[in-house]
């Protein structure tokens, strides 16, 4: 179904967030527009949908059932009972992602997903293909809704699209180049089980991509990816690989040295390897990858140095919502004292890998726990580092700084989602910076030119 086919129909939007607003902007002459939410929409949300009818609570489902087409927002799980019931009630259910792919799916689309690293990888792919001389558009889960670029003024040579598991669950066509960075346990509350989460992620590969770019180190990914889809691996000898010294190599030769950039850690070198593989698979690899990557600006809240006071640096890794991402952050900051802030929404995380990384690091001066998973994380860390719980982020930042005794890194890498305490990981990162400044630190730009890091 194309957006043009919604003309003259009564359209329901299930959700009132950024993506739903992009659908409303893309519509031309619908017969009516209904915006349905679980809780009453506030004034700011209503302003994004001029002329729409709003419904919430039990009335929301009835209002949607009276629509011809309902566009489900990513935050609404397709596995909810009321979603299943609506599908049986008559309206056509679709998503903004599928509406966009109906228009542009036959073009050169490089789709990127993964539990962690997909935003950085997508941004790196865009950087590389642009350096190769292509006009490329970057959109999707990275913060630019796909329908906001439904009708670009200039047709791009390539699209780089970041896709979340929520967007992939009912995707009905695959991009030409499909990139899967990794698969970890995540989002079980939305998908219902780990097996379904993995299957929904791999739906990216289920509709005939020309090539799948896969992490050769992820055994589960390699075992579950469709065998009939041509694949190119990264992270393994013979492909673009990250040997652990901050470089990306191929056939023994250094292709890019990330130590000359603001990207920290082996995980980011692996992201760069994925991006180089994808660009090459698309026929758009730049002649000089080092020059292309040298000016890359890291994305916010991803191992980003945000404040400093003397010998103490405050690093915001609020995007960390899994223990695996916390492990990567600690390894990226090996070699100096760290005070770790961990904890957030409980999704049944296994903190044993994070505890092992704390012990491996050897210089974690304190681990400060936040509700609700902080107590479980600290129990797993045990004697590997001094531990204490904090009531909120302000208290945690102050305690972490004090534990460093004037030298080291205060690291916010929560290894858990932010929901229940913050709107999203971005707000959590902003609050972390505010708490750092409250201790007397200054923003990085005012603190001696410390580069942003990721």
Image (tube, rainbow, N blue to C red):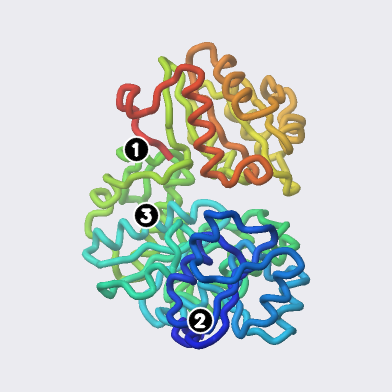
- Give the answer, above or below, for where 450 lies relative to 52: above
Indicate the quadrant where residue 393 lies. Answer: top right
Q: Nearer the viewer, residue 295 or 392?
A: 392
Percent coordinates x, y for residue 275 in the rendering: 39, 58
Percent coordinates x, y for residue 404 in the rendering: 55, 16
Of pointers 2 and 1, the one earlier in the residue sequence:
2
**In the picture, which quadrant includes the C terminus?**
top left
Q: Residue at x 37, y 35 (%)?
A: 452
Of pointers 3 and 1, the one earlier in the residue sequence:
3
Residue 93 visible to the viewer: yes
Q: Are marks 2 and 3 in contact (CB under 8 Å)?
A: no
Q: Nearer the viewer, residue 281 or 296?
A: 296
How many marks are shown on the rendered structure? 3
* Mark 1 crowdedness (10 Å alpha carbons): few <14, some 14-19, many ≥20: some
Percent coordinates x, y for residue 385 in the rendering: 67, 22
SS at mark 1 in the image: helix
Give how far apart the Cα atoms at labels 2 and 3 are: 24 Å
The residue tagged 1 is 259
Q: Nearer the viewer, residue 280 or 408?
A: 408
- Give the answer, above or below, for where 14 lies relative to 123: below
The residue tagged 3 is 124
Q: Residue at x 46, y 54 (%)?
A: 119
Of pointers 2 and 3, the one earlier in the residue sequence:
3
* Viewer-side label of 3, 1: 3
Q: Nearer the viewer, residue 155 or 388?
A: 155
The circle on residue 208 is: 2
Give how far apart the Cα atoms at labels 2 and 1 are: 37 Å
290 vs 221, left or right, is: left
């Amino acid at each position: 179904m194309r957006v043009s086919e919604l003309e003259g129909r009564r359209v329901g939007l299930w959700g009132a967030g950024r993506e739903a607003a992009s659908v409303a902007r893309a519509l031309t002459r619908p017969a009516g527009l209904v915006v349905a939410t679980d809780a009453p929409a506030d004034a700011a949300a209503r302003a994004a949908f001029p002329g729409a009818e709003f419904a919430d609570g039990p009335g929301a489902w009835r209002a949607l059932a009276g629509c011809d087409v309902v566009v489900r927002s990513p935050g609404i799980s397709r596995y909810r009972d009321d979603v299943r019931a609506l599908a049986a009630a008559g309206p056509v259910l679709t998503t903004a992602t599928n509406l966009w792919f109906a228009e542009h799916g036959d073009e050169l689309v490089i789709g990127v997903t993964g539990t962690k690293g997909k935003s950085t990888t997508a941004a790196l792919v865009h950087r590389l293909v642009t350096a190769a001389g292509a006009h490329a558009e970057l959109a999707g889960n990275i913060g630019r809704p796909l329908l906001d670029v439904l009708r670009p003024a200039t047709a791009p040579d390539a699209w780089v699209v970041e896709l979340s598991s929520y967007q992939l669950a009912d995707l009905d066509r695959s991009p030409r180049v499909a990139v899967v960075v990794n698969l970890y346990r995540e989002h079980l509350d939305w998908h219902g089980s780990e097996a379904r989460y993995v299957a929904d992620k791999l739906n990216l590969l289920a509709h005939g991509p020309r090539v799948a770019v896969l992490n050769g180190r992820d055994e589960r990914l390699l075992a579950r990816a469709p065998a009939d889809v041509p694949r190119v691996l990264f992270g393994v000898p013979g492909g673009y690989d990250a040997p652990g010294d901050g470089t990306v190599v191929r056939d023994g030769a250094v292709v890019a040295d990330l130590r000359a950039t603001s990207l920290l850690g082996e995980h980011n070198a692996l992201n760069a390897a994925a991006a180089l593989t994808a660009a090459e698979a698309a026929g758009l690899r730049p002649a000089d990858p080092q020059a292309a990557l040298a000016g890359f600006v890291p994305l916010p809240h991803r191992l980003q140095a945000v404040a400093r006071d003397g010998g103490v640096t405050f690093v915001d890794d609020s995007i960390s919502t899994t223990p695996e991402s916390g492990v990567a952050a600690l390894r990226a900051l090996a070699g100096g004292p760290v005070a770790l802030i961990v904890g957030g929404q409980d999704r049944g995380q296994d903190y044993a890998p994070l505890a092992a990384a704390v012990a491996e690091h050897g210089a974690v001066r304190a681990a400060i726990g936040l509700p609700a998973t902080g107590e479980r994380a600290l129990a797993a860390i045990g004697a590997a580092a001094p531990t204490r719980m904090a009531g909120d982020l302000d208290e945690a930042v102050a305690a972490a700084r004090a534990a460093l005794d004037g030298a080291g890194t205060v690291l916010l890498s929560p290894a858990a989602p932010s929901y229940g305490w913050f709107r999203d990981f971005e707000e959590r990162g902003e609050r972390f910076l505010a708490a750092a400044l409250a201790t007397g630190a200054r923003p990085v730009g005012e603190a001696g030119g410390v580069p942003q890091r990721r």
